[in-house]
Amino acid sequence: MFAATLPRPDLEQAFIVDQTMYNDEALKDAESDTPMKGILVYAAAKSETEKAMWKWMGEHKPGFVMNTIVSNAKWTER
């Protein structure tokens, strides 16, 4: 989940997370001096890793399938 977004417990309504989202906010905020720095660095690393993995898959088109999972989110058809 952290590759796509940070938890947002203060929201009043649900928001959509889809396959186009990356946690660019964490990458920017990971350089700040905050008590959340550890989780922000982790989230930024997850996001950048997934971007690189999908880029590699697109460029090399290997003979295997790559999947990523957001395991703590509720799936909703749009």
Image: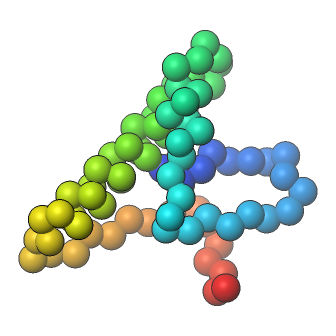
**13 horizontally vs 53: left or right:** right
Q: In this view, which residue lies farthest toward the right?
A: 12
Q: Is residue 48 above or below residue 77?
A: above
Q: Residue sitting at 46 percent across and 37 percent down?
A: 44
**43 horizontally vs 48: left or right:** right
Q: Is residue 39 visible?
A: no
Q: Quadrant of residue 53?
A: bottom left
Q: In this view, which residue lies farthest toward the front?
A: 59
Tell me how many marks there are: 0
Instruction: Give x and y (percent) for residue 60.
Output: 12, 65
Q: Is residue 10 visible?
A: yes
Q: Is residue 35 above or below residue 73?
A: above
Front-most of residues 19 and 9: 19
Q: Is residue 1 above or below residue 36?
A: below
**46 horizontally vs 65: left or right:** right
Q: In this view, which residue lies farthest toward the bottom?
A: 77
Instruction: Give x and y (percent) for residue 59.
Output: 17, 63
Front-most of residues 14 and 22: 22
Display colour scheme: rainbow
Instruction: Give x and y (percent) for residue 70.
Output: 51, 63
Q: Residue sitting at 56 percent across and 22 percent down?
A: 37
Q: Residue sitting at 79 percent across and 65 percent down?
A: 14
Quadrant of the drawing holding the C terminus:
bottom right
Q: Quadrant of residue 72?
A: bottom right
Q: Quadrant of residue 39?
A: top right
**38 horizontally vs 16: left or right:** left
Q: Residue sitting at 50 percent across and 52 percent down?
A: 22
Instruction: Give x and y (percent) for residue 40.
Output: 54, 31
